[in-house]
Amino acid sequence: MSFIEIVKGQVSEMMGGTNAPSGLVGSLMNLVNSQPGGLSGLVQQFESSGLKDTVASWVSTGPNHPITGEQIQQVLGNQKLQELAAQHGLNLQDISSHVAQFLPQLVDKLTPNGAIPKV
């Protein structure tokens, strides 16, 4: 089993007791991978949007700082979120809330040693 499959399984397990749409973890993995620079590029996008401390907490080994759906919209943009919403049959507000809930966990699991892995 690959590292990515393990991470998807861990985050999916965390989502088990929620009302998150099926396949959201895979969609979030695609979101991370589709960023220019992958995970590093996504982290830089949050940093340049004024959320350096927040995203740093997701990468570090400590607790994850929360983020709001509105902040997710500011960083990722409505077009990407509309695409995700359409894939999962949700509206923009609902998908933003789900991404805000699970993206920090995903980044945390992708950085188990408190640093972005070298590609």
Image (cartoon, rainbow, N blue to C red):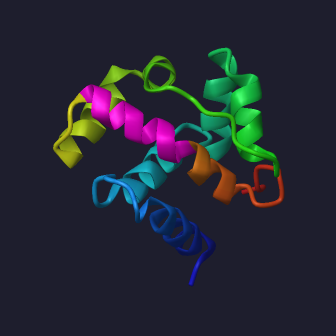
Which x, y percent locates residue 88? 22, 47
Locate the N terminus by quadrant. bottom right
| Magenta region, main secondary structure | helix
Query: In this orientation, which residue lies closer to the viewer: 68 or 114?
Result: 68
Where 24 sits versus 51, above or below? below
Residue at image location 66% in from the left, 57% down from the top: 110
Q: In the rendered image, which quarter is residue 39 located in?
A: top right
86 lies left or right of 75:
left
Residue at image location 29% in from the left, 40% down from the top: 84
Which x, y percent locates residue 65? 68, 35
Identify the residue at the far front of this view.
17
Q: In the rendered image, which quarter is residue 112 located in?
A: bottom right
Which x, y percent locates residue 10? 55, 69
Residue 97: in magenta span:
yes
35 lies left or right of 17:
right
Locate the C terminus by quadrant. bottom right
Residue at image location 63% in from the left, 49% down from the top: 107
63 lies left or right of 96:
right
Query: In this orientation, which residue lies closer to the viewer: 24 or 34?
Result: 24
Query: In this orientation, which residue lies closer to the viewer: 63 or 32?
Result: 63
Q: How many marks?
A: 0
Where 87 sits versus 46, above or below? below
Query: In this orientation, which residue lies closer to the viewer: 63 or 112?
Result: 63
Residue 99: in magenta span:
yes
Residue numbers of the magenta segment:
92-103
Q: In the rendered image, which quarter is residue 44 located in?
A: top right
31 lies left or right of 105:
left
Residue at image location 57% in from the left, 74% down from the top: 6
Where 39 sits versus 80, above or below? below
